[in-house]
Image: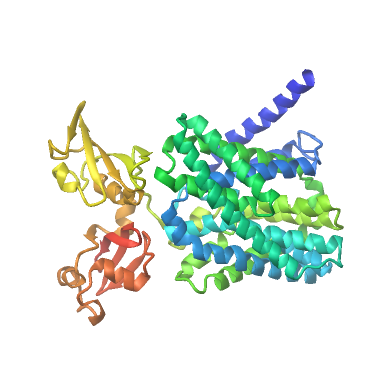
Amino acid sequence: MDSLNLFLLIGTGLMFTGLLLGSLSARFGVPSLLIFLVVGMLAGEDGIGGIQFDDFSTAYVIGNIALAVILLDGGLRTRLSTFRLGLKPALSLATFGVAISAALVGAFATWMMGVDWRVGLLLGGIIGSTDAAAVFSVIKGAGVTLNERVASTLEIESGLNDPMAIFITLMLVGLLVDPAADWGVGMLWTLLQQFGLGALLGLLLGAVISELLLRVRSNEGLHALLLCSGGAMVFALTNLVGGSGFLAIYLTGLVAGNRRGGTGDNVLKAMDSMAWLAQSGMFLILGLLVTPSRLTENLPWALAVAAFLMLLARPIAVWVSLLPFRFTWREETFIAWTGLRGAVPIVLAVFPLLAGVEQTYLLFDITLVVVLISLLGQGASLRYVARKLKVSVPPTTEPKQTVPLAAPRDRYLMQFEVEAGARAVGKPLGELSEDKRTPLILYRNQQVLSLSDNPDIEAGDLIAWLAPLSHKSALSDLCHKMSNDEKRYYGDFTVLGKTPVAQLIAIYGVEAPPPLWQGLTVAEMFTKQVGKQTVVGDTVRVSGLRLRARSVEDGKVVLVGLKLPG
């Protein structure tokens, strides 16, 4: 009994310390995942704790379970419109991008360290993919709001690239264990099987699980537990039949979060706790595996590999993978810099250890250094780099509460408090009703007013809206006053997307509009200039004016900020 209590005391003490320091780390710009990893290292055999832990099998199991929970949580928070926006570029990065990164790092490591080319490529495969836990956590904790095109691409890439990384790792481990093995058509079939079965079972079983949960009345905590257990079943089943469990559970979360009303705020808060538990426990265990004294033996090589990956391999892979898509050089540079490495490379580095491949401690040590440098260098600088490259946008004020409805499927109940100076102040409630969004009730001084009362809106009113989730930004703009950051970013004036360009230029322009813009609205001009997937923050300049998309619905500009010349 005493040994059990001692185990609980040490385990919960480490967890409490990591969570406490992790919650404070955002103030100093340090990723919380790095804190958990360092706490684990300090508790390990070379640290003040002196805990001897080298059970790679247990760490592998815990790492896989934790990654499954983190990917499920990421899928639940990804809106379907965002997924459509970032799917194609993210898929290119998750396949071609990982392969290019792995090949470049493999060639560099083989040349620099003089190892077998298969060992060099194995190292490239292990560290070639970005990590979902790192990407989701660091972006959330960075204190910046990335433009939707960049954020969706990064998040979806991290959820989709595991099959390619696992395929490369397993292929090269197999070649090192059995050099005579057939790795031609058979290996290609394995890759297709990983992607195909992962996508099929994730989408199919995700729809089944979400349908079942909608028919079961449960509180938010139980609903989150049912989601986790159902997602874990999808993860395990997909792995058993030869598919990618990581891809399947991410898609399960995506389907469950968007099907028939999606997932409410309270369920997401419960899932957030589980994701924190998963990532903190995983990084603590991985930190215990680290032997810092051994890392110094290969430190020069590890630093060289990390620098090559971050400064050459990843940027080249991103540039090639995103060639067919309309990304600006600023966006491509930021995506290249935010190729965060985390738990996935460490878990993949355990594969060759479990298979008994020679020189695997070399690979494991280099991988750990790369992860540490990625989290410390790339993760900690994300906020600064995002603002420097101008890929972040001022955050909009969130609704007081968001509740999904089972029917109609695409409608949510959102409640906003009207601020003094907001555009809605002074307007009748009925005037704010549009085709897809309806103000249901207004709460004022303990009175509930409806559309039939049609009151004039005052500051401090609480308005409950029935609207699609894509209208959240537009409703926020309507009910809240622009902050100083928003004014600096968007300009002092706002213009509706349906405004004719000629009319806008006649009032504010300093020169005649180009013939190309004659007869077009502002929204149509953005579509011609930027494309059909316009996002908040996209900018168009015409006749000395700077127009920046402020509110976008389904890729079409609804509201723009206007910056006058001079």
Residue at 20%, 65% (x, y): give it: 499
Depicted 87 relative to depicted 455: above or below = below
In the drawing, does residue 106 fall left or right of residue 68? right
Picture coordinates of residue 402 (x, y %)?
36, 39
Residue at 78%, 57% (x, y): give it: 363
Q: Quadrant of the C terminus?
A: bottom left
Between 168 and 526, which is closer to the camera in this rendering? 168
Quarter of image, res 28: top right
Picture coordinates of residue 472 (x, y %)?
33, 48
Depicted 478 relative to depicted 303: above or below = above
Residue at 63%, 36% (x, y): give it: 18
In the drawing, does residue 433 fall left or right of residue 333? left
Quarter of image, res 543: bottom left
Residue at 31%, 69% (x, y): give it: 526
* Direction top: furthest residue: 1
Between 24 and 114, which is closer to the camera in this rendering? 114
In the drawing, does residue 51 fall left or right of residue 17? right
Depicted 510 relative to depicted 479: above or below = below
Between 349 and 441, which is closer to the camera in this rendering? 441
Quarter of image, res 496: bottom left
Picture coordinates of residue 336 (x, y %)?
56, 64
Task: Please say whether residue 320 is visible from this viewpoint.
Answer: yes
In the drawing, does residue 130 fall left or right of residue 539? right
Q: How many marks?
A: 0
